[in-house]
Image (cartoon, rainbow, N blue to C red):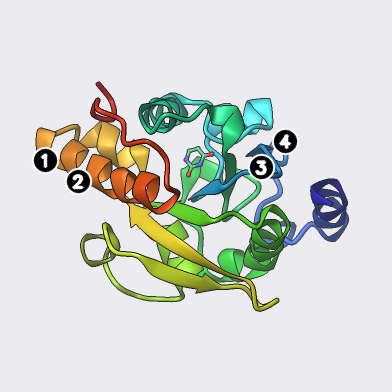
């Protein structure tokens, strides 16, 4: 079903009015039966080249975070709001987001995760339809209601690229505490080590 959605995305090319210069569509990666889904902003350079989300430096940190939760990358599903790389990694515009979001909502429907972690402000705002700041959103459970009626709890946290830029003990502790709430929600064993360690 994800394949059919991807084929429809490729046919519709909702990015076409905005982004014409890219290498690969970066649709999503991971288990279609994942209990947990991570949603980022848009592909960067490495993702554009490989066709896979979160494979660059931020992706490596995300994978360490996933592992610290006691999971493997293959256990979760990873997607972005935008499926193609914006020139110069520009922040997605409202129009770009509006054009791409319906495909993300369908991706969520198909994977039907038990929880979503939104990474950073653009993903959190897109999923939660809010204008709140990251500082206010992170660490608190919200609910995403898909147009289909499907509902899933959402934990917003800082984007790993932000964490790399501001790799402080405080920020790492905040992200780790956000992720522990997800571990708890999913009823998984509580890991002992801190994310990024
Ligand atoms: N940042 C994102 O938001 N998504 C990616 O896939 C890579 C970096």
**x then y, percent, for residue 28:** 66, 42
Relative depth, front residue between 25 and 155: 155
Q: Quadrant of residue 68?
A: top left
Residue to which mark 2 is pinned: 174
Residue in view at x 40 percent, y 53 percent:
185
186 lies above or below 191 = below
Whether tag 2 and tag 1 are in contact, CB under 8 A, the answer is: yes
Residue to which mark 4 is pinned: 24
Instruction: Classify 10 Å Cα crowding around label 3: few (below 14), some (14-19), many (20 and above).
Output: many
Q: CA distance from mark 1 to mark 4?
A: 36 Å
Looking at marks 3 and 2 on the same chain, the residue that comes earlier in the sequence is marked by 3
Whether tag 4 and tag 2 are in contact, CB under 8 A, the answer is: no
What secondary structure is found at the residue carrying circle 4?
A: loop
Whether tag 3 and tag 1 are in contact, CB under 8 A, the answer is: no
Q: Nearer the viewer, mark 3 or mark 2?
A: 2
Q: CA distance from mark 2 to mark 1?
A: 6 Å
On the question of residue 28 being in view, the answer is yes
Q: CA distance from mark 4 to mark 3?
A: 12 Å
**x then y, percent, for residue 122:** 43, 59
Q: Quadrant of residue 98?
A: bottom right
What secondary structure is found at the residue carrying circle 2?
A: helix
Residue to which mark 1 is pinned: 170
Residue in view at x 39 percent, y 69 percent:
142
**x then y, percent, for residue 54:** 52, 33
Residue to which mark 3 is pinned: 28
Q: CA distance from mark 3 to mark 2?
A: 26 Å
């Amino acid at each position: 079903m994800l394949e059919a959605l991807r084929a429809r995305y490729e046919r519709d090319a909702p990015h076409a009015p905005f982004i014409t210069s890219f290498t690969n569509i970066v649709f999503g990666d991971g288990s279609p039966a994942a209990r947990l889904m991570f949603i980022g902003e848009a592909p960067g350079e490495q993702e554009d080249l490989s066709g896979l989300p979160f494979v660059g430096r931020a992706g490596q940190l995300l994978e360490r975070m996933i592992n610290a939760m006691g999971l493997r990358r293959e256990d979760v599903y990873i997607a972005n709001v935008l499926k193609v790389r914006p020139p110069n990694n520009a922040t997605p515009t409202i129009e770009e987001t509006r054009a791409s979001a319906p495909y993300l909502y369908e991706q969520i429907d198909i994977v039907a995760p038990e929880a979503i972690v939104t990474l950073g402000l653009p993903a959190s705002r897109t999923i939660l339809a809010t204008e709140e700041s990251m500082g206010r959103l992170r660490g608190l459970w919200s609910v995403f209601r898909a147009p289909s009626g499907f509902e899933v709890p959402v934990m917003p946290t800082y984007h790993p690229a932000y964490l790399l830029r501001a790799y402080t003990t405080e920020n790492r502790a905040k992200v780790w505490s956000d992720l522990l709430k997800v571990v708890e929600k999913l009823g998984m064993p509580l890991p002992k080590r801190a994310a990024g360690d």
